[in-house]
Amino acid sequence: MRSDSFTTLISSVCFAAFGLFFGGCSYRIEKNTSDLNSIIVSRESMDSVSYQEVKNKVFLPKCISCHGNSGGVNLDNYASARSHLEQIAKSSLITKTMPKAGNEPLAAGEYLLLAAWVKAGGPETPLNGSDTPPPAPVEVLKPEFGSIKKLIIDRKCLSCHKPDGKASRVPLNTPQEMIDSPLEVVIPGNADESGLILSLDWENSTKPMPPKESGISQVSPEEIQTIKEWINKGAKD
């Protein structure tokens, strides 16, 4: 009996370690997570975590495309993120309603890192006085499809415009798909009349994209200008 209990304990510890160190696997705590006390993180993790680390590893890749500077829950700066700590805990750790359905869920390492930060009280710098990681380098949008897809389309569009999404009739995965669309999503050499550019103009579009009700932050004027430059140059791959 004692041997069985020991084996169970070791298996549990190994599983937790696997989740922490191999965070690339999609991971969801069971839906019956009732409160923060049911999420186990080490005291060491809570003492060493900082806002910048959470921003680099969780908020930037999974959250800021929606929760940037467009209003609502802004996770792009510490003061705002800290003021929404309770909401972050509930939606991301307990009810698991964030990231939204259709977006990539938090991986094991991301979930545990966020849990450590929330349970530590949302510190700006590590409680143990260790060095805060530097901000992640900002990737600059370029007038190239690969850059536009990675930084704009993947983050702000594909949750709807994927093959099984509600906007699948307007595919955005390749330049050729957009050029061939009967909706004239992209007209090479003519950005001003391309449907993609017209829809990104929240002020003048009758059907702005991303939809305002989606909560996804709008594409900035500077980003739109870069996309226009790519289209006017021929919208090449």
Image (cartoon, grey):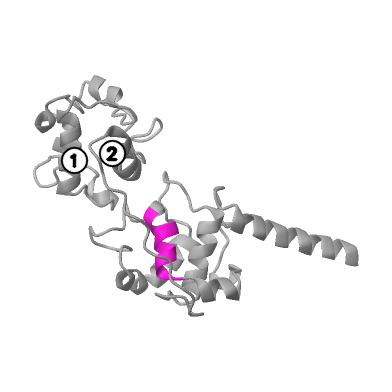
Quick check: 147 left or right of 21?
left
Residue 157: % across, % down? 31, 40
Q: Residues within 10 Å of mark 2 (few under 14, many from 20)?
A: many
Residue sitting at x 21%, y 47%? 219
Residue sitting at x 35%, y 38%? 158
Residue sitting at x 61%, y 69%? 40
Query: Could you say which disc has been placed on residue 216 in the image?
Result: none
Does residue 47 lie above or below 212 as drawn? below
Residue sitting at x 39%, y 68%? 87
Quick check: 97 left or right of 152?
right
Residue 43: % across, % down? 59, 76
Rendered image quadrant of residue 155 = top left
Residue 200: % across, % down? 18, 41
Looking at marks 2 and 1 on the same chain, the residue that comes earlier in the sequence is marked by 2
| Position of the N terminus by quadrant | bottom right
Query: Could you say which disc has been placed on residue 148 in the image?
Result: 2
Residue bounds of the magenta highlight: 50-60
Query: Helix or strand or loop: what does disc 1 sit on?
Result: helix
Examine the rendering and report whether any part of residue 13 can be seen: yes
Residue 58: % across, % down? 43, 58
Query: Helix or strand or loop: what does disc 2 sit on?
Result: helix
Mark 2 and 1 residues: CB-CB less than 8 Å, in contact?
Answer: yes
Q: Main secondary structure of the magenta part?
A: helix
Name the residue carrying label 1.
Answer: 226
Examine the rendering and report whether any part of residue 200 can be seen: no
Please state which of residues 71 and 10 is positioned toward the viewer in this rendering. Answer: 10
Q: Three-letter amino acid code at disc 1?
A: Thr
Quick check: 223 left or right of 79?
left
- Residue 216 is a magenta residue: no
Alpha-carbon span between mark 2 and mark 1: 9 Å
